Image (cartoon, rainbow, N blue to C red):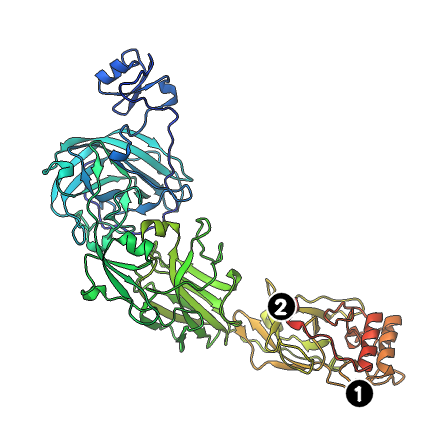
Amino acid sequence: MTASSPKQGFRSVACMTLLATSLSASAVAAGEDRGTSGVCCLLGQCLDDTAHDTLAECEADGGFFIADTDCQVDPCPVCPFDEPANCQQVQTIFGLVPFMDRNPGNGLDGETASVLADDVKFGGVVDEICWNTGFYQTPCCQTSCVQSIDDTWEIRIYETDVGCPAIPGAELAMSTIAVLSKLEGTGAGTGTWHYSGMLHTPIELPNGGFAGDTYWFEVSGYGEPGCEVHATWSRDDGNKHHAVSTWTAPEPDTHAYSSDQIGSVDVGFCESSGIATPPDVLGACCTCSAAGPGVCTEDMTQKDCVVLRRGIWIPCTDCSNPTGTCRAVPDNDDCETPFLVSHVPTDGTELVLADQTNICATDDGPGLQAGEGGCASSLPGDADLHEDVWYSYVAEACGELTVDSCVNDADFDQMIAVYDATNGCPLLRSDEIGCGDNTCGINAGPSRVTVDVEEGQELLIRVGGLNNSMHSLLGSRATGDFVLHFSFDENCPLVNSPTLALPPHDILKNRYISILPGNAEVGPFDIRLTLTSTLVNGVTAIGASWWATAPINGAGLSPATCISVVSSTRPTTPPDWSGCSTVHLTGCPIIPTSTYHIRTVLDGFVSDPPLVAETQAKPGDRWYGDCVGFFDSVQWTPPNGAVNIDDAVAAIKTLVDPTKTPGCGSPPCNATHLSVTDMSPDLDGTQINLIVNINDVLSIIMGFRGMEYPGTQIELCP
């Protein structure tokens, strides 16, 4: 194929990196005793025939000799001049090599291009070059397209300088490249390659290499339709100057670059005549301040500014230039001082917050959750949301809340996380209820997150950027300006709060609340119980909520009478109440002399008004233990406001003869329930064991003796 100019690129997810390849045989330096036989590496081939298996024969043909081996082990290096003086070495992170996406495509048949471009000082005539590149397929990490790469490569050299910024100037020369050798590297699901090639037309630099100017070079090649491509970066072992930045592409058809496509990274490559380091590029460095505009320092390199000072680097300017104006720390930098969001429309329009930024923001949130619904990176340990700003919102309806920057594009690798703010600022990864990273379809760009919310639910929205070891290595920061869009899809199911149980289960109890769940037409749903007041001393959990767990049908209950033990953990799936006409709620948080609000929760909707339900009131000068009135020869009458021998006898009769359970009436006791006298399995008053035994009798006696109710630690209830 003929060389074509790459088209404008698109940014895609890069899911693999290039791993280093080791050689199994050692090369022998010229002038040493290299033995009598070996292999000759010549123009990308391994030769061990009798015409090339000695040092003299190999060097006579211009080859590279390796002693004491043969071609069966393929010992020839891809790049015979892989030496520090000839190369910008690739530096690894966690054993991985940082990469850059280059996906311009040639615009003719769907092919995609791999482009490496950098500023450099060459040592003389450019005639042989080694480089690394990779090919992979969408969706990520498919390998069907990496076995037959089209090896049409070309090199261009441009006039340039380390000016401000270093943008390629006029094209000086172009040559196609004859691939001499290539080796497929390792990597999960990738086709990564080490190349060496000879220029069909060697390029002689006008000013003699090292003694002359800095030049811009570009190596480009094409893969198959449907494949994405990437090229490797290096950093600290390179020249630490301008190169093509990540996830951008040259302008269509021109091979021209704009200043915002140039970064401070280097590509990994070698050139036979050697390379040298261009002079440093200097600029203004802004360090942030919480007290107002930051401090500006002139004549700093990007590495010194970003990596060492954690500043914002503005190339090729000084502190008098308006573009060098330093930012202050944002007002909503801390979770405790979020920007208050209100009146998100539900009519299909958006609330738009313009002129947002996380530049100069600090870190104060927890790590992110990995896996489905989370967006923590798979890189080890440190790939999380950093330099965050905060927004608060109280849902004005139930449905789906969407927060994004897709329309206006955040100009950095943005991440958005959402937290339930019922208990204030998030402390744990598990407080996260939604997160978005690269969810606008642009890799390392803006994000979108959608979460289900309940009416009145308090949320905290956290916006920041992905920062990890790779960002630090490249001297980049995940900060920038953005526009934030809020939209709401209202979707409220019609459900009502439960109601109080019918007689005989409507009497007040010490450790149970009896309800009719209702809402049979909507299927499974959650029931939430919130403590609103209590006379029990020491309770600090006013406002805390618990969830009704799946109902059970205990011994002695009629088929439609169920028990549900409440828990601080919401059920994974909503319980099915269809088999329960009456539900007795019980558990650690349900204590005497208290009031609760009980609501139905379904698909983000919370019923209103709530059912206001009470446990047994304070019996006179006692604190608890009033279970019944008296036995009227047929059944026990309701509680009478006093704790006496009748209450203990009622519990004993329940223990001895279930047919005498209060509320039973005459057998077969279809209305029976032990909830009237079931107080506790032990003396600390925390749990319910769903049976009546001697401990319940003792609890009633303790109430008769005037002891305060011991359930003061219900905030610790499971």
In the image shown, does 415 or 480 lie closer to the viewer? 480
Seen in the picture, residue 640 relative to 162 is either above or below; the reply is below
Mark 2 surroundings within 10 Å by alpha-carbon count, few (fewer than 14), some (14 through 19), many (20 or more): some
Q: Are marks 2 and 1 in contact (CB under 8 Å)?
A: no
Seen in the picture, residue 355 relative to 284 is either above or below; the reply is below
Where's residue 508, x and y in %? 74, 82
320 displayed left or right of 25:
left
Mark 1 surroundings within 10 Å by alpha-carbon count, few (fewer than 14), some (14 through 19), many (20 or more): few
- Amino acid at circle 2: Ser
Specify the quadrant of the image occupied by residue 691: bottom right
In the image shown, does 418 or 311 lie closer to the viewer? 311
- Say which residue label 1 marks: 640
User: Residue at image x 22%, y 16%?
Assistant: 60
Count the marks: how many? 2
- Say which residue label 2 marks: 568
- Point out the image quarter for the C terminus: bottom right
Specify the quadrant of the image occupied by residue 547: bottom right
- Per the rendering, the mark at residue 95 is none
Separation (CA) of disc 2 from disc 1 = 33 Å
651 displayed left or right of 496:
right
Query: Is residue 415 visible to the viewer in this orientation of the structure?
Result: no
- Amino acid at circle 1: Asn
Where's residue 320, x and y in %? 18, 65
Where's residue 636, x and y in %? 84, 82
- Point out the image quarter for the N terminus: top left
517 displayed left or right of 689:
left
Q: Quick one: label 2 or label 1, which is nearer the N terminus? A: 2
Query: Is residue 196 visible to the viewer in this orientation of the structure?
Result: yes
Where's residue 282, x and y in %? 21, 54
Q: Secondary structure at mark 2?
A: loop
